[in-house]
């Protein structure tokens, strides 16, 4: 069981802002002292480049960086050759999409969904435009879910790519990806999974998921910003063209010839985010020290409590009552979400207002924008009570006019 | 001033009872459409300029109260101004909204209340959307003048 008071000691932000009510972890989680210390160690004690230097400091930096890769690999049950460090989920997904620019042909189909974050769909929109391939949307259920049945309706012999989210960043629905991947592979399609929202909340096992590529970010799982992971099956990674060219990714160069290293270095041109990789590894250690079982139990309990309390408030529309991830998308009738968010900010309550970089979700819901409250291990029932009180006050304030 | 006072004083009044709202079908008006990328809000501005003077200006959009009320206040502030004067007024509004000193000789009326928004930097984009649209419109007029 998670003791929130104890957990908060791990998050230095609460020393500066003891009254912070933070419900925006789906955008970026708060940061752990253990992670900050590891990042700090690299800059204070090492600060040198990896892979290149033949001196002690470079050796230690390289060891920490490559150990981080091993740790990420172990965390998602991959081989270290399959772990590429990127700038984040966005750059990982863009890398893969660009790689297929030279592969896709007119009339090939890319299956995606209206639940996607912009980073999982815009790269494919552009690839479709440039290659003549067609974007096909999985019909969602009334509730807004991706289902295997819906997926099978659009899967065909023309399907070459399936690029979808594991968990929606607005609706919190979990995609039945194992089954979808099985059907996609029967058509020899490549499956690319946006795991930015699932990685902070559930155990990812790339062997059982069997997806071909998967991406997630450090900053949503207590790690630093500016680092993310692209997982790819080894064989596929070595087949696709690198996206960036430069130092440390090249095998051999002559005046008119160049060959590239195998993955992962093939995709890590230039000096990588060394401190970020080290910090992400520390974040993984932290998550494992608590355990996904306890994380889930706690966040689920807080999620259900907040949902129940919010349902009691009159004049509120909740869009995702059955969300699997601890996230609530809602609106207060006749008040713009930004106006509410500013009022909540006045009570130190942090929520997200807008379209959450997923405009197609707003369009699906038929709204301009929504409020989103997302939960993680440092949230308590007291947070929920303050949140509900502030929501009621904001609603009543705008009702006067 | 806290945010509640800010809302009470001007914002909600202009939000619920906007001035110069609604577009008209008249091709002699210059139209500018802008989106607020963070929230999906949108704003369209229509302005009529004769002899360098903005003799009519209208707005239509969807957005939060700060965004929509600011559009209403903007039309009241800029209507009747010469376009050079209007550019100066818009510049002063940007100073004010960032919490910097502004020239009260140039920027007057309900617009000055938006100084309170400077405490909420996340909302500056909302408050300036309509003003940015007019700024773009005036720049376009000036470019066309230069290039004949």
Image: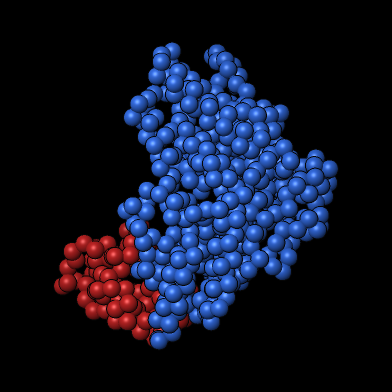
Chain colours: A blue, B red
Q: Is residue A275 above or below residue A256?
A: below
How far across and down, in percent of the image, does residue A19 sit?
36, 61
User: Taking B123 as reference, is A222 left or right?
Assistant: right
How far across and down, in percent of the image, does residue A85 sit?
54, 34
Residue at 55% of width from left, 53% of height from top? A1
Displayed quadrant of residue B85:
bottom left
Displayed quadrant of residue A287:
top right
Displayed quadrant of residue A205:
top right
Residue at 45% of width from left, 18% of height from top? A59
How far across and down, in percent of the image, does residue A335 sit?
47, 77
Residue at 40% of width from left, 81% of height from top? A397
User: Taking A220 as reference, is A364 left or right?
Assistant: right
Residue at 68% of width from left, 64% of height from top? A144
Depth check, front residue: B135 or A31: A31
Evaluate whether residue B11 shows in this view.
Answer: yes
Depth check, front residue: A285 or B25: A285
How far across and down, in percent of the image, does residue B4 sit?
32, 77
Depth check, front residue: A79 or A123: A79
């Amino acid at each position: 069981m998670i003791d929130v008071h104890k957990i908060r000691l791990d998050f230095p932000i609460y020393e500066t802002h003891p009254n912070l009510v933070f419900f925006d972890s789906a955008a970026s989680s708060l940061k752990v002292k253990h992670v900050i210390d590891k990042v700090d160690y690299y800059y204070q004690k090492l600060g040198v480049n990896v892979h290149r230097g033949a001196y002690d400091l470079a050796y230690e930096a390289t060891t920490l960086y490559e150990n981080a890769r091993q740790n990420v690999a172990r965390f998602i049950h991959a081989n270290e050759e399959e772990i590429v460090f990127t700038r984040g989920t966005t750059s990982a997904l863009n890398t893969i999409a660009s790689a297929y620019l030279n592969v896709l042909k007119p009339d090939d189909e890319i299956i995606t969904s209206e639940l996607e974050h912009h980073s999982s769909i815009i790269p494919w929109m552009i690839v479709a435009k440039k290659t003549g391939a067609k974007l096909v949307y999985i019909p969602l259920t009334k509730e807004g879910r991706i289902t295997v049945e819906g997926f099978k309706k659009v899967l065909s012999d023309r399907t070459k790519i399936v690029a979808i989210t594991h968990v929606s960043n607005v609706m919190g629905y979990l995609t039945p990806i194992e089954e979808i991947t099985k059907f996609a592979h029967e058509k020899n399609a490549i499956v690319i999974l946006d795991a930015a929202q699932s990685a902070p909340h559930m155990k990812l096992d790339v062997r059982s998921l069997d997806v071909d590529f998967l991406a997630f970010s450090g900053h949503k799982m207590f790690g630093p910003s500016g680092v993310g992971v692209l997982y790819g099956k080894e064989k596929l990674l070595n087949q696709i063209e690198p996206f960036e060219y430069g130092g440390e990714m090249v095998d051999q160069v002559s005046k008119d010839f160049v060959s590239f290293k195998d993955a992962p270095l093939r995709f890590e041109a230039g000096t990588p985010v060394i401190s970020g990789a080290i910090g992400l590894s520390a974040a993984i250690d932290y998550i494992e020290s608590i355990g996904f079982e306890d994380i889930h139990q706690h966040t689920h309990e807080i999620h259900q409590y907040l949902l129940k309390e919010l349902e009691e408030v009159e004049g509120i529309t909740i869009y995702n009552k059955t969300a699997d991830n601890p996230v609530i998308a809602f609106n207060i009738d006749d008040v713009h979400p930004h106006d509410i968010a500013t009022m909540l900010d006045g009570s130190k309550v942090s929520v997200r207002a807008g379209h959450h970089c997923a405009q197609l979700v707003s369009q699906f819901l038929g709204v301009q924008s929504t409020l989103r409250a997302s939960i993680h291990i440092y949230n308590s029932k007291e947070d929920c009570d303050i949140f509900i009180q502030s929501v009621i006050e904001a609603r009543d304030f705008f009702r006067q006019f | 001033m806290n945010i509640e006072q800010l809302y009470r004083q001007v914002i909600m009044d202009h939000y619920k009872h906007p001035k110069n709202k609604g577009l008209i079908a008249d091709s002699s008006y210059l139209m500018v459409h802008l989106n607020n990328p963070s929230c999906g809000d949108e704003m369209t501005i229509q302005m009529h300029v004769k002899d360098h003077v903005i003799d009519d200006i209208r707005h239509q959009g969807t957005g939060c109260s700060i965004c929509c009320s600011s559009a209403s206040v903007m039309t009241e502030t800029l209507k009747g101004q010469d376009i050079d004067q209007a550019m100066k007024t818009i510049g002063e509004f940007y100073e004010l909204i960032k919490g910097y000193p502004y020239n009260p000789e140039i920027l007057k009326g309900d617009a000055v209340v938006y100084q309170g928004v400077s405490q909420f930097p996340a909302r500056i984009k909302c408050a300036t959307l309509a003003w940015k649209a007019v700024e773009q419109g005036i720049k376009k007029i000036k470019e066309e003048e230069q290039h004949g």
